[in-house]
Image (cartoon, rainbow, N blue to C red):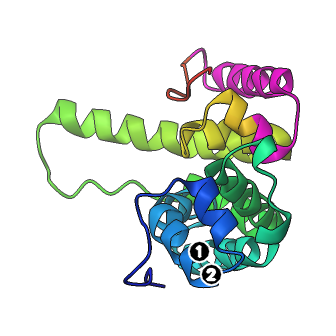
Amino acid sequence: MAAPPDAPTELDDITIMARSEQRPDLFAVLYERYFDPIHRYVAARLGTHIADDVAAETFLVAFRKRPGFDPAIGGVRPWLYGIATKLVAQHHRSETRRLAAFQRTPVHVADGGHEDRVTARVTAAHAQGRLAAEIARLSQGERDVLLLTAIADLSHQEIARTLGIPYGTVGSRLSRARGKLRTALGGVNPLIGGSDG
């Protein structure tokens, strides 16, 4: 989906959404701005094999729902992540299977490099598999908040808007999720990234 040649790409998201009511082709500007980050988020949640379809479906749903978009409740970016998160939830069984397969993935050491490097790679692969298994055990709400923080790098306020939950719930779910992962991984801090604001 390419933006029309005369599309005012310098306009902010809210203005483009409003104008796309009269000029639906302007929605392509938002597609170009946000498709890649939405695709990365979906790919991290469900795997690359389904990310193209779910990311495209996110924009199809957004295009259809744009008349009901309310700029008073937040920006276009968190709104799109909210749609993507709901579509991911519909594919939850696939996500759970992917995390389980990720846990079982064998460690490949092809370089035959230095012994310390090999040991570090084996340890990292083992921790990664354990992390995937523990993420799969989190509740859907905890997993959504955790992955919107880690993958999409949304702020707590954006996550609250994305999921339609109170701001304080974001912090408590994130804290619980991190605590569960930290305990399961023997005190290792499992997650970095995300902002508070």
**Which residue position is annotated with label 2?**
23
Q: In the image, what residue occupies the spot 59% across and 74% down? A: 27
Query: Given contact means CB atoms under 8 Å apart, are the residues at marks 2 and 1 in contact?
Result: no
Query: Which quarter of the rendered picture does the C terminus lie within?
Result: top right
Q: Where is residue 67 in the image (x, y as percent from the top left)?
A: 82, 70
**Residue assigned mark 1:** 27
For this rendering, which residue is in front, 176 or 36? 36
Secondary element at image label 1: helix
At label 2, the amino acid type is Arg
How many numbered circles are shown? 2
Frontmost of labels 2 and 1 is 2
On screen, residue 1 above or below 173: below
Q: Is residue 56 visible from the viewing direction of this image?
A: yes
Q: Residue 161 carries which label?
A: none
The residue positioned 46% from the left and 62% from the top of the image is: 33
Write the start and end of the magenta stretch as one range: 160-187
Q: Quadrant of residue 104?
A: bottom right
